[in-house]
Image (cartoon, helix red, strand yellow):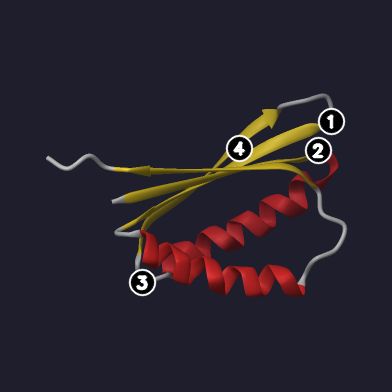
């Protein structure tokens, strides 16, 4: 199993709009056939004027994630503009074989 986490530190004044976008992304993940599970976490004020959200998703393998991510990137590229994202940190975990 593969677990992907992406943490977005964003401008605090964009919290509500970004939260709506992540709710939509999470719904997309949960409806994606090869996504095993997903969650979105919120972490209040990180810096003086920033907040953070973390998206956690579980997949059988990297290829399944890549297919979903490629689809999402096409959507993101159509809606680029003044981004509220200050920093994005992506991490990946795999389970140890028994």
Q: Mark 4 and mark 2 in contact (Cβ < 8 Å)?
A: no
Viewer-side residue, 36 vs 27: 36
Measure the alpha-carbon separation of dots 2 and 1. 5 Å
Residue under circle 3? 33
Q: Residues within 10 Å of mark 2 (few under 14, many from 20)?
A: some
Q: Which element is circle 2 on?
A: helix
**Image check: 20 left or right of 80?**
left
Residues at marks 2 and 4, CA–CA distance in whole angstroms:
12 Å
Q: The residue tagged with tag 3: helix, strand or loop?
A: loop
Residue of label 1: 49
Whether label 2 touches label 1, CB < 8 Å: yes
Question: Percent x, y for residue 58?
Answer: 37, 52
Horizontally, residue 42 falls left or right of residue 51, namely: left
Res 12 label:
2
N-terminal-most mark, 3 or 2 = 2
Residue 76 relative to residue 4: left or right: right
Q: CA distance from mark 3 to mark 2?
A: 33 Å
């Amino acid at each position: 199993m593969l677990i992907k986490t992406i943490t977005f530190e964003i401008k605090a004044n964009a919290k509500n709009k970004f939260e709506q976008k992540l709710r939509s992304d999470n719904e997309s993940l949960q409806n994606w056939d090869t996504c095993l599970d997903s969650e979105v976490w919120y972490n209040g004020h990180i810096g003086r004027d920033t907040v953070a959200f973390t998206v956690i998703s579980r997949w059988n393998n990297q290829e399944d994630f890549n297919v979903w991510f490629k689809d999402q990137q096409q959507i993101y590229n159509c809606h680029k503009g003044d981004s509220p994202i200050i920093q994005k940190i992506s991490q990946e975990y795999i389970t140890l074989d028994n």
